[in-house]
Image: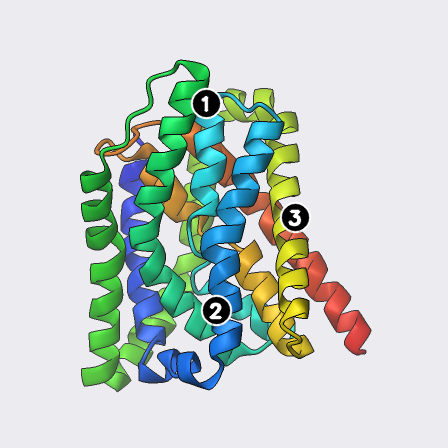
Amino acid sequence: MNTVWIVMPILLVLMFLLGTDLDKKAFEGVTKNPRAILAGMTGQIILLPLIAFLIAWTLKLPPVYFMGLTLVACCPGGSSSNVFSMLAKGDVALSVTLTAISSIVTLFTLPFIMEAVATFVSDQSGATISLPIGKLLIQNVVLFLVPMLLGIALKKFRPETAKKVNKALSKVAFPALIILALTFFLQYTKEIFDNFALLGLAAATLILAAMLCSSLLSRAGKFGKAVRRTIVIEVGMQNAAQAIAIATSPFIFDSGEMAIPAIIYALMMNVVLLIYVAIVKRKNA
């Protein structure tokens, strides 16, 4: 069974859930704190894909994993990053704004970045990797933008209903992601174990390098501690489910192997960020 038929309904729910968290206040940070928004978006859209590309090239990853690592680096963090920002005593309002903007902007930047990567990998390896950029744009709009806009509309016109729906879906979202990860793991157990050392190194390096570089970027901007923590989390936390949906989609890459870096990244990302939150809390104490 193609995992995409499990991940797509989960993504629809997650993006609708994200929409019910957003309103005009979520975008007010653009005018209130434009420098922090610019720093976060620079890290998300430019810095992270570039780091992933350099890591994949340095480690000489096979073409399918080269694509998979850069793909997960192009996906935004989603609403989970807001929770981690809250736990780390970050700027939650900034986190929500960055999540809202990146979730929309990356729907359109991702196809063009991945097209450039696919061309590079094909030229370097001799493998034929084609990216139907038009289909990817359409899938992004249908799977991500439309349910998010529906969630925003529900919150605007039926705020009480949106609150109840949000509460119910929040309880379902995490177990659904666990089921997705487990299903994918069982389906690709051998490939994951055979390549865990190499891809584990690549994913861990990507997470740590992203957090380090985003920390340096935010320090260069002379932001306060709360803002710095938020930028680190927003840049370091990626939406693995979105990467899996694109990799396994029969309309795009139709490759389960390409999604393996996203699964390994998701596992390591949560562990690293929980450690980061624990360190921050200890310092605050």
Q: What's under tag 3, amino acid-wise?
A: Ala
Say which quadrant the N terminus sits in: top left
Residue drawn at the location 35% of the way across and 47% of the way down: 110
Q: Which secondary structure lies at badge 3?
A: helix
Q: Quadrant of residue 127?
A: top left
Q: Residue at x 34, y 51 (%)?
A: 109
- Whether residue 253 is situated above or below residue 51 in the rendered picture: above
SS assignment at label 1:
helix
Q: Kindly identify which numbered label has been placed on residue 209.
A: 3
Packing grade of label 2 (10 A; few <14, some 14-19, many >=20) is: few
| Circle nearer the viewer, 2 or 3 | 2
Task: Report, in whole angstroms, how far the alpha carbon at label 2 lies from the one at label 3.
Answer: 19 Å
- Is there any visible trace of residue 134 in the rendered image? yes
Q: Are marks 2 and 3 in contact (CB under 8 Å)?
A: no
Upstream in the sequence, badge 1 or badge 3? 1
Q: Which residue is mark 1?
A: 63
Tag shown at residue 282 = none
Q: Secondary structure at mark 2?
A: helix
Q: Position of residue 140 (x, y in %)?
A: 25, 50
Q: Are marks 1 and 2 in contact (CB under 8 Å)?
A: no
Considering only vertical position in the picture, is 133 above or below 10? above
Q: Which residue is mark 2?
A: 38
Q: In this view, which residue lies farthest toward the top?
A: 126
